[in-house]
Every structure is written in C-alpha cells, then in structure tokens.
Image: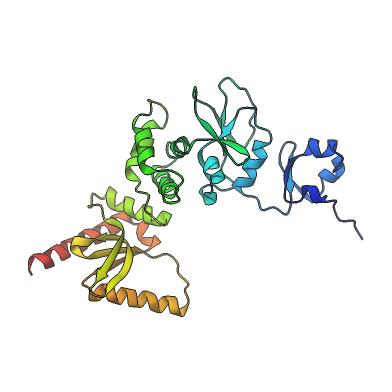
C-alpha cells in the first residue's frame, strides 16, 4: 500500500512559503512536491484541498510582494467581499511603491503607486482605498463590462457611485481616465445582475428614454411587484428572464404577480439572453411598444 502524503495539521487549509515550512521542519523538499500541496507561484504553495480562486491567488502573491506594496482593482474588491468580480484566471492587481523593481512573473499586473496614494489595511493585506479600487477597475477593459462591474460594486455597498463620479471627473489625463468618466456616468448601481446592466445599456445606446430601475408597482390592494425596469407613465414593465428552474409554488407566485400587473393596466416585456444578442431588434420592440402605449393613452 502506498503511503499517503504528509499533511501536517499546521498547514491544512493554508497558503505558505515552501522555503519557510522546510526551514521550520514541517515538510521536507520531497514532501513539498507531493500531491498534498498545490504550487501557486515560485516558493508559494497551498493545501491541495483548497479550491483555486482569485482570493487564493491574492494570498499567494501577497506572500511575495515587496514591502510597502498593496492590492488594487478587482483583487482589492475581492478582498473587500465581492468574490465573483474576479476569477482565478484574472491577473492579480498590485501597486508597487514608486521606484520599486520586482519580477512579478505571470498572473500579476503591477503598476506604481501615485505619490502619497492612500492605502488601507483590509484584513491581512494592504489595499488601495475604495474609490481608487473602483477607478482601477473601470478604466480598463470593455466599457460594458466596466459598467457591469461598477454597478456590482455600488450595489454591494463597496463604494458610493457619487464618490466614483466625483473622483473620475478630476482624474488627470492618462490611460483610461476618459473611459472611467464615461463608465461612471453610465452606471446606476441598481442592477441586480450583469444582464440587467446590459439590458439598460442596450436601451441607452438606442437613444431610448432611460427607464426607472427596480420600480415598485402598486394597485388598489397594495404592492404588486418590483420590476427590473419601467416606463411608469406608459405602464410598461421590462423584465429580464434568465434560465429559471423554480418550484411549483414559485411558478404560481410569478404567474399571480404577472396577472396582477396586467389587471392593473401594465404590459410586461420579457427579455432573454437571446434578445441581448440582437440589440437592434430589442430596441425596435421597445420603441414600437412605447409608441403603441402613447397612442393608446392619447385616444382615451
């Protein structure tokens, strides 16, 4: 029978420097190379039972960062409790003290700190402050994805939208500063899913009036529903429908909700992911629906 790999209790569930645990006598170099441990970076290992996540990679990078460095961007957002804003494939974003030279190796995106840039401690690690973290995220990548990210940060309470807008407005000219200002104006922080943000951006790009997000509808008996988007003056509700596998009770509740909306004079436009792949057609449907409702109101 083959012997199981040595897994000292002190290292279970941990990320650690290989050279350190060998020096402490917890593992031998041969044991360190066993299947019990996952090598994350040069001289950095983790318990193989840990799931590989961006948060785990942040810890691995943190163990080898130069003194005075900090995390920023999506990595800092993960440390602040927004785990799914970055995947294990995304680079770890770090700030290095000005003038610091460091071989970051693959999987890390590094840049220098601004003079007197504020950093704060988040748990074990140093991070850019909340606004700088958000600005680092929205100044790079596709605009739509940046808006989705900012909506998520605002909705989760990591940063205030007004704070980001004010900071973006005074950014000096530089890479991504113009995009940051655009993204800050496009975000509203109310979307409850990435697809809701995408839907709102489709309507905005088509020149349609901005609908009210997360609108609460009432009738004579009280609250009916909160809809994703609404044109209240036209009683048009727009709902994004993802893949839904609900129980019978949830299905019946949804049908009652829809019936009450219709009885109250509302029309509901259901949007799917396929509709988002054809934005021109979707915008045309909304435009026609608005025209029909306007005509109906004007003939009363």
Question: 15 left or right of 293?
Answer: right
Q: Is residue 156 above or below residue 288?
A: above
User: 133 or 2, which lies in front?
Assistant: 133
Single out the residue that lies furthest toward the right. Answer: 1
Spot occupied by residue 203 in the image (x, y as percentages of width and height)? 28, 53
* Image coordinates for residue 28, horizontal then vertical, percent: 87, 41
**Residue ID at (61%, 46%):** 55
Quarter holding the N terminus?
bottom right
Residue 184 visible, this angle: yes
Which residue shows up at 24% across the image and 64% down it?
236
- Quadrant assignment, res 260: bottom left
Q: Quadrant of the C terminus?
A: bottom left
Query: Residue at the spot x=39%, y=45% of the render?
Result: 147
Q: How is the image coloured?
A: rainbow
Number of numbered discs visible in the structure rendering? 0
Say whether residue 241 is left or right of residue 108.
left
- Among all residues in the image, which is located at the extreme top? 99
Residue 35, visible in the rendered structure: no
Is residue 118 rendered to the left or right of residue 228? right
**Nearer to me, 135 or 124:** 124
Residue 57 in the image, given as x and y percentages of width and height = 64, 43
Q: Quadrant of residue 294?
A: bottom left
33 relative to 202 in the view: left or right: right
Residue 271: image location, x then y, percent: 34, 63
Q: State the image quarter where residue 98 is shown.
A: top right
**293 over 183 or under it: above or below:** below
Looking at the picture, tell me which residue is in the foreground, 214 or 28.
214
């Amino acid at each position: 029978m083959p012997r199981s790999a040595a897994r000292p209790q002190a290292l279970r569930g941990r990320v650690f420097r290989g050279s350190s645990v060998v020096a402490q006598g917890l593992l031998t170099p041969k044991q360190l190379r066993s299947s019990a441990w996952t090598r994350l970076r040069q001289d950095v290992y983790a318990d193989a039972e840990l799931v590989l996540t961006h948060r785990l990679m942040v810890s691995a990078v943190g163990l080898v960062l130069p003194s005075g460095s900090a995390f920023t961007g999506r990595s800092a957002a993960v440390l602040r409790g927004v785990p799914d804003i970055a995947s294990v494939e995304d680079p770890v974003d770090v700030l290095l003290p000005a003038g610091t030279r460091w071989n970051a190796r693959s999987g890390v995106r590094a840049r220098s700190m601004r003079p007197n840039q504020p950093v704060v401690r988040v748990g074990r690690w140093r991070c850019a402050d909340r606004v700088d973290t958000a600005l680092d995220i929205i100044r790079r990548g596709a605009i739509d994805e940046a808006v989705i990210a900012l909506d998520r940060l605002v909705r989760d309470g990591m940063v205030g939208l007004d704070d980001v807008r004010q900071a973006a407005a005074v950014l000096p000219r530089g890479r991504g500063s113009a995009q940051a200002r655009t993204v800050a104006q496009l975000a509203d922080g109310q979307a409850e899913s990435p697809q809701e943000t995408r839907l709102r951006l489709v309507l905005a790009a088509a020149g349609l009036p901005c609908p009210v997000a997360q609108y609460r509808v009432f009738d004579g008996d009280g609250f009916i529903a909160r809809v994703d988007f609404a044109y209240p003056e036209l009683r048009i509700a727009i709902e994004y429908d993802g893949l839904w596998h609900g129980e019978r009770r949830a299905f019946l509740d949804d049908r009652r909700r829809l019936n009450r909306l219709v009885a109250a004079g509302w029309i509901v436009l259901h949007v799917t992911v396929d509709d988002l792949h054809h934005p021109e057609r979707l915008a045309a449907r909304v435009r026609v629906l608005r025209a029909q409702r306007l005509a109906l109101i004007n003939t009363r």
